[in-house]
Image (cartoon, helix red, strand yellow):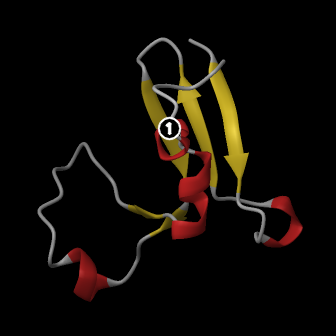
């Protein structure tokens, strides 16, 4: 497996998260973001025990290749 960093939040203080990666083995995106802790919003979702929820700012969408008309990550 090789993770390829596609982009890090340009507005994140101290170069922290969120960060978007592409996994070339699974052909999936891996997203590092903030844990969603708001119980009111979590209660509105049906989250299986093997899944989690993160928050990811809209400004990070620019790093998804499909947003720029590319069919997949150029890695």
The x, y position of residue 12, in whole percent, is 76, 69
28 relative position to 1: left or right: left
The x, y position of residue 15, in whole percent, is 84, 60
Q: Quadrant of the N terminus?
A: top right
Q: Residue at x 67, y 38 (%)?
A: 6
**Residue 56 seen:** yes
Q: Look at the picture and state if 50 lies above or below 2.
A: below
Of the pair 12 and 74, the residue shown nearer to us: 74
Of the pair 61 and 20, the residue shown nearer to us: 61
Q: Classify residue 52 by image quadrant.
A: bottom left
Residue located beneath label 1 in the image: 69
Furthest residue toward front: 69
The x, y position of residue 62, in whole percent, is 60, 53
Q: Look at the picture and state if 56 lies above or below 67.
A: below
The x, y position of residue 54, in whole percent, is 43, 62
Q: Classify residue 27 by image quadrant.
A: top left
């Amino acid at each position: 497996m090789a993770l390829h960093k596609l982009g890090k939040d340009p507005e994140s203080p101290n170069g922290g998260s969120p960060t978007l990666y592409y996994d070339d083995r699974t052909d999936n995106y891996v997203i590092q973001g903030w844990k969603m802790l708001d119980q009111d919003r979590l209660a509105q979702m049906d989250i299986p025990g093997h899944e989690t929820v993160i928050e990811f700012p809209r400004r990070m969408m620019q790093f998804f290749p499909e947003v720029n008309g590319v069919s997949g990550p150029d890695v």
